[in-house]
Amino acid sequence: MSLNAKPTSAEWHPTRILKVSSAVFYAVSSFLIIVVNKIVLTNYRFPSYMFLGIGQMAMTIVILYAGKTLHFIRFQDFDKSIFKKIFPLPLLYVGNHLTGLASTKKLSLPMFTVLRKFTILMTMALESIILRKTFPKSLVYSVFAIIFGAVVAAGSDVAFDAEGYTFILLNDVFTASSGVYTKQKLGSEGLGKYGVLFYNALLVIVPTLLLSAYTGDLQKAVAFEDWHNLTFLSCFLMSSVMGFILMYSIVLCSHYNSALTTAVVGAIKNVGVAYIGMFVGGDYLFSWFNFIGLNICMAGGLAYSYLTFHSAAAPDPEPSPAEEKVRVQIQEEVSESRLRRSGSLNSC
């Protein structure tokens, strides 16, 4: 398909298998990058979250540019219209990254988990405002079940940190806004999935690198003593590649589903990781509040998934009044044409 070609109806109404497979791809990618990042940051004690993110952005730029050069993929060449088409995604990405790091340091894990679930609610609100979407009540109830479950899971953690709460709620806003605007930008002529990924990473990497140097984060990364360790280098490279795969899976899931579905899939994945943590790792502290809350979260997530993906196999929605009017006019014209042809045959 050419860059200026209009999308076909199949692209805007993907089949259920595309919706489900893109959501599963995102969930698996998100889980795997947690494992790889944990190895780099915990096992090897790499001192810089930010530099790891820079490596992932750099890998995204290299892979997509190579794919475009070799004609495996296509997206718009750089020109002055790119800034208008991609804005405000780069700003949202930086804000999401900074507030996420700050809130992680300030809050306990239970409160971090529960407050991050409000990203789902904010995404729903922003999709209603920006994308003019409406949601059935059953879907809204399933979202509230996820949030209620998160609140119950964190019920035993009553610590309050005003600064931490501010950072995490800002992080929710940035995350939700980024998801909704990504969905919107996917419809921009010429950008597409690959253009959104490439130009967002290209415009963000330099400011992030400067910020890393200003905060001293870059100096810590450069001075890291295991750069000569081939095993560490392999893990760092794997993390960078997984960063690209994760960003691609997020865009793909948003493309075939919605920003809200992407947010819910992320929440379900986090609950799944918590379940795994009960049996692997040895750092899960059992409490009935947490266990019951996790089950409520999972039930809400599964209900949302069923309602969303089951609807993909439902019949086409009722046409709008304008569409119905056009359909009736076409039927009348066809009927008149048949009558004229019938009259002509009778007169012969």
Image (spheres, rainbow, N blue to C red):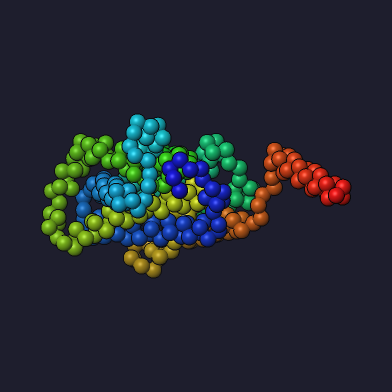
| Image spot of residue 1 (x, y percent) | 45, 48
Q: Nearer the viewer, residue 158 or 45?
A: 45
Extreme residue toward the right, this view: 347
Residue 163, placed above or below residue 35: above
Horizontal side of 167 relative to 257 (left or right) equals: left
Horizontal side of 125 relative to 173 (left or right) equals: right
Horizontal side of 328 relative to 204 (left or right) equals: right
Q: Nearer the viewer, residue 72 or 23?
A: 72
Q: Nearer the viewer, residue 152 or 236?
A: 236
Residue 24, placed above or below residue 166: below
| Image spot of residue 65 (x, y percent) | 29, 47
Residue shown at the point (51%, 48%) measured from the top left: 258
Residue 294, placed above or below residue 182: below
Residue shown at the point (35%, 60%) measured from the top left: 32
Residue shown at the point (46%, 52%) measured from the top left: 253
Q: Nearer the viewer, residue 77 or 223?
A: 77
Residue shown at the point (17%, 46%) measured from the top left: 220
Extreme residue toward the bottom, this view: 279
Residue 31 visible within the image: yes
Residue 165 visible within the image: no
| Image spot of residue 26 (x, y percent) | 42, 56
Number of marks: 0
Horizontal side of 54 relative to 340 (left or right) equals: left
| Image spot of residue 127 (x, y percent) | 53, 40
